[in-house]
Image (tube, rainbow, N blue to C red):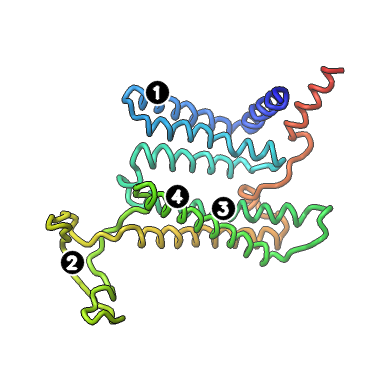
């Protein structure tokens, strides 16, 4: 058991160092996260320390996937994933970019839709090109599967945010200030007649003004906005994937985002295991 763990750790290190550019990004981000974690420990902000530890683990996920599933992530895609993790966990949560920078959450959700579609597309594309699997899928079907995969990931994430807000008392579904509402809850007859309230300038709760300058929408608009930009990201990659299959890999741009099966010389786990077998003999 210990030998298997040691083999995987060694192969993981080899995987991380495989591409110079992605390794440089990984190393830079890792150093930044460690420095931030030390600072958070001194400040006794242990919740942020947890985010740092989580980020350090997540930064190894792309290499772990490549090692375990023998999938080669293009360098561009790997760098985007690494930066995405850092932007979401460190800048977004610890740096409070979600609230300080307008559109930060929107950018990340759009990128998430793009990345998830790339992953979904590659899973189908790898099967489609596998000689052991006797079927051929049309470019449109593959693009549609990638789109559906991305949207499913987006919906599942919004489910997670909702559960954490309701059960954990968090605010992952960020609130939105609106100045008009339409609701049947205020129908004096108790029926289904929509009541419109416009030009809302303030809202009071238990007799105390919230001072927000409008009505507080608790997460609905944020959730729908996240799903909509996820939709945009998914559509963009699905179109790229469609033409990639149509022209079968001729597009250099698409090749930067679509994972493929590893070549035998890049299967580091197998290489490490073979080296150990030679040493045992």
Q: Which mark is residue 114?
A: none
Instruction: Find the distance from the CA under tag 2 to the CA under tag 4.
Output: 31 Å
Instruction: Find the distance from the CA under tag 4 to the CA under tag 3.
Output: 12 Å
- Indicate the position of residue 17 as horizontal and vertical percent values: 63, 29
Q: Are marks 1 and 2 in contact (CB under 8 Å)?
A: no
Q: Is residue 118 left or right of residue 53?
A: right
Instruction: Find the distance from the CA under tag 1 to the CA under tag 3.
Output: 32 Å
Q: Earlier in the sequence, mark 1 or mark 2?
A: 1
Query: Dividing the picture into quarters, in which one does residue 146 lie?
Result: bottom right
Q: Residue under label 2, please give it.
A: 200
Q: Which mark is residue 38?
A: 1
Instruction: Find the distance from the CA under tag 1 to the CA under tag 4.
Output: 26 Å
Q: Earlier in the sequence, mark 1 or mark 3?
A: 1
- Indicate the position of residue 120 as horizontal and vertical percent values: 63, 54
Q: Earlier in the sequence, mark 2 or mark 4?
A: 4
- Mark 2 or 4, closer to the camera: 2
Q: Earlier in the sequence, mark 3 or mark 2?
A: 3
Q: Residue under label 4, please give it.
A: 108
Q: Residue under label 3, please give it.
A: 116
Query: Dividing the picture into quarters, in which one does residue 81 lie?
Result: top right
Residue for point 59% across, 58% down? 149
């Amino acid at each position: 058991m210990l030998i298997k763990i040691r083999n995987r750790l060694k192969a993981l290190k080899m995987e991380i160092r495989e591409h110079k550019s992605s390794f440089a990004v990984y190393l830079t981000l890792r150093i930044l996260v460690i420095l931030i974690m030390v600072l958070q420990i001194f400040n006794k902000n242990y919740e942020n320390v947890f985010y740092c530890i989580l980020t350090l683990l997540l930064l190894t996920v792309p290499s772990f996937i490549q090692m375990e599933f023998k999938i080669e992530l293009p360098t561009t895609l790997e760098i985007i994933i690494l930066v995405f993790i850092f932007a979401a966990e460190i800048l977004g949560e610890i740096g409070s970019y979600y609230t300080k920078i307008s559109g930060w959450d929107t950018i990340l959700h759009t990128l998430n839709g793009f990345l998830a579609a790339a992953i979904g597309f590659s899973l189908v594309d790898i099967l489609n090109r596998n000689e052991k699997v006797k079927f051929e899928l049309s470019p449109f079907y593959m693009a549609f599967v990638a789109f559906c995969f991305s949207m499913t990931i987006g919906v599942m994430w919004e489910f997670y945010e909702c559960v954490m807000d309701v059960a954990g008392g968090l605010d992952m579904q960020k609130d939105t200030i609106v100045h008009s509402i339409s609701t049947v809850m205020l129908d004096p007859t108790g029926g289904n007649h929509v009541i419109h309230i416009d030009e809302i300038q303030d809202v009071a709760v238990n007799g105390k003004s919230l001072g927000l300058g409008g009505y507080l929408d608790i997460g609905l608009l944020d959730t729908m906005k996240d799903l909509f930009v996820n939709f945009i990201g998914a559509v963009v990659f699905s179109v790229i994937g469609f033409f990639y299959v149509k022209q079968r890999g001729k597009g250099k741009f698409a090749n930067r985002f679509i994972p493929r099966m590893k070549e035998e010389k890049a299967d580091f786990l197998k290489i490490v295991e073979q080296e150990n077998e030679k040493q045992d003999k």
